[in-house]
Amino acid sequence: MILPENAIPSDQVLLERTIQGDTEAFGDLYERYLDEIHRYVFYRVSDRFEAEDLTETVFLKAWEALPRFESSRVNLRAWLYRIAHNTVVDYYRTRKPTADSLADNLRDSRPSPERQAQSRDEQQQLAAAIRELESGLQHVIIYRFINGLSHAETAQVMGIREGYVRVLQHRALNQLRKRLEGEK
Amino acid sequence: MKDNMTDILASCLEAIERGERSIEECLALHPEQREALKNLLSTAMFARAGAGYAPRTGFRQASRARLLKRLKPHKPVTFWQTLRHTRQNNHPIFVRRFAMTWLVILALVASLAGGGTVYASGEALPGDALYSVKLAVEDARLFLSDDAGDVNLHIEFLQTRRDEIQTLIAAGRGDDLPLAMETFSAGINEAAQALAAVAQDDPARAAALAILLEQALSVHTQVLTVLLDIVPEEAKTVIEQAIIASSKGQEIVHGLFEDGIPGGPPGEIPAPPITPPVPTGLPGGAPPITPPVPTGLPGGAPPITPPVPTGLPGGAPSITPPVPTGLPGGTPSITPPVPTGLPPALTPRGGRP
């Protein structure tokens, strides 16, 4: 079957090309998953610049590990999230967290000054509240609501049952609400 | 009622995400839970605002080129990587070859030790007559080591406990799973206690050990979570309890060093609730000992046995990497020769079920 020229190649196609050493194909995968991996990292570390560095690290590790990646058995997104998680864990192990610099870190790429300020405040408040949650609950909030994964996708990425995702989601929203109310 | 709320919340969120219902429509469908549901849904919507966060435009533009520049060509896969990969896939030839190698090593150690019963107990599972001997041997090793050594040993024993759970499942011995879980849970408590003891005398060493223990527990949690999906229904409760115990253990270990001032007794992992025995003869035949876990993760390592610690490149472990034992050189620990008929002083210490 001949694909139209502007057809978007699937993850599988890009992966196969990447495993053969095609760096441009890897660059396409990078752009495809950049936003969600970056958001994931940001809401775990609450520092825009650290999140940028760590996001690049995630993809570098992914590139290095690709020859051992089994696309038939492992979901690419789940795999990237796992690398991201481990990268964040490493980050916290190797350096002490400093005082949050969220306000500084959330400064740019916003549409209007008013909207930017509102959005920044909300993100700041949200990031602070998320960081107070247990690790598992943090993940559910980030996957489900910030990165928009479905229950099934969240279950796949977290390696747990979908039913358990629902339980954690309920718990996570309850906890998050308490944290947010505590900040007011 | 709480479970019901979990499902109502999930179905409402799904309907809202698919654009089938508004928040108000969902609330109208559940008048009794209206207030609680409203709070949860509004929190969920607030969290969704977090999706507005995006990388800086400059970063987005420059990072692709920067990243591609840093990529090094993939190294050809080495013999050892192929071997490891093959073992991950449970190729029968390699599984048998490795099993034989370890059997030979264990036989040599056992003959040198001269303790037939001790050797035999090494393979004992919860519920076996020799299982108490196996635990006694472990306790003897703990008795002979210092606090820091205890933490390392506990890490090693936890790996054994997890292996036992997997073996019991594979053998369809559901009746013995609660005891296995209880022993696993007790092991985590003991490890945390030992770590707290090290922290009082040598905080720096305790911090290093905490990393090892936390890593080990993280691996256990991951493997058990994968197991949860493949075990028969009857065994799920026990596995869930083990997951909770392992996760709780991680939290406790993490909590010990959160403020940078290690010390103080760790929290206790709640004793597992008494559960009805899981029926034996689990349906569906015995699942494979190695769960079909994702492979190819950085630092991917052989599953289950033997526990050969490897460095985890970049800290991105595979799902079933060996649990670090903290022993130098990455060699598997070998049970030292311990005579049978342990004296009273070497009998199990407290905490064992």
Image: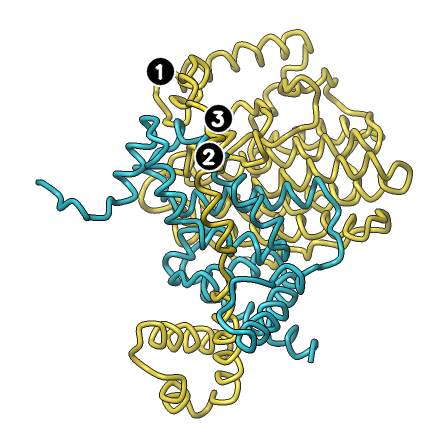
Asked which secondary structure carries label 3, the reply is: loop
For residue A142, side relative to residue B269 (left or right)? left
Query: Which color has been applied to chain B in this rendered view?
Result: yellow
Q: Chain of mark 2?
A: B
Residue under the image location 24 percent in, 44 percent down: A9
Q: Is residue B281 left or right of residue B115?
A: left
Q: Position of residue B133 (x, y in %)?
A: 67, 29
Residue drawn 84% across the image and 36% down it? B204
Q: How many marks?
A: 3
Mark 1 or 3, closer to the camera? 3
Number of other residues with Cα within 10 Å of mark 1, as a class: few under 14, some 14 to 19, many 20 or more: few
Instruction: Find chain A in the image and tell me its colour.
Output: cyan
Looking at the image, residue A64 lies above or below residue B231? above
Residue A168 seen in render: no
Please name the residue that numbered disc 2 is placed on: B297
Number of the front mark, 2 or 3: 2
Residue identifier under label 1: B93
Question: In terms of sequence position, does the residue under pointer 2 or pointer 1 come before the other?
Answer: 1
Label 1 is placed on what type of residue?
A: Ile
Q: Which residue is mark 3?
A: B302
Q: Are marks 2 and 1 in contact (CB under 8 Å)?
A: no
Mark 2 falls on what kind of element? loop
In this rendering, do the residues under marks 1 and 3 share a single chain? yes
